[in-house]
Amino acid sequence: MHIVHLEDESPLREILRVALVAAVPDANLIQFINSDEMVAYVEQHKDDIDLYILDIRVPGKLDGVGVAYKIRELGGEGVIAITSAYNGPNKAQLQELDCQWFPKPWHIMDVLEKLIPSIRK
């Protein structure tokens, strides 16, 4: 399973990394701090990525919602989860992007329970 995570807060990146390694030991997790680096990676690997976890407020030209639109524009078909402690995308955006919303604070095991089954279908 190939997972890409966009989060600029170091403690949250580490929590997600530790939880994913425990829950999905064979996962290939790549983490990014800013949207520009992540988009460049996605352009090269979009066909291999199963799950995108995107914080909304991050450094770079695009916020997390903009990255989700870019992923879909590039043809990325993986599951997208958007997360933030602030306002999230509206229902129309979530439907258009075919993604899930997880407001912070979230419990990592709750997130994984909801996302992992949809990836393994």
Image: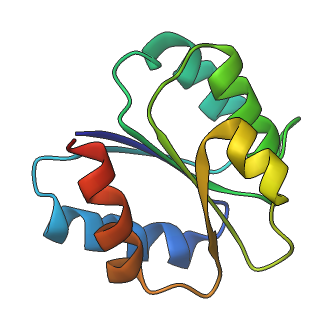
Residue at the far left: name it.
26
Residue 69 lies left or right of residue 90; in this view the side is left
Residue 14 location, quadrant: bottom left
Residue 9 lies left or right of residue 93; in this view the side is left
Q: Nearer the viewer, residue 49 or 8?
A: 49
Residue 3 lies left or right of residue 121; in this view the side is right
- The x, y position of residue 35, in whole percent, is 72, 39
Considering the image in quadrants, where does the C terminus appear?
A: top left
Residue at figure coordinates x 57%, y 14% from the top left = 75
Q: Can residue 58 be seen in this view?
A: no
Q: Which of 117 and 57 is in front in this view?
A: 117
- The x, y position of residue 59, in whole percent, is 82, 50
- The x, y position of residue 19, in whole percent, is 28, 73
Residue at figure coordinates x 75%, y 31% from the top left = 69
Q: Which of 76 and 63 is in front in this view?
A: 76
Residue 68 location, quadrant: top right
Residue at figure coordinates x 16%, y 58% from the top left = 24
Note whether 75 is above or below 38 in the view shown. Answer: above
Note whether 21 is above or below 95 in the view shown. Answer: below
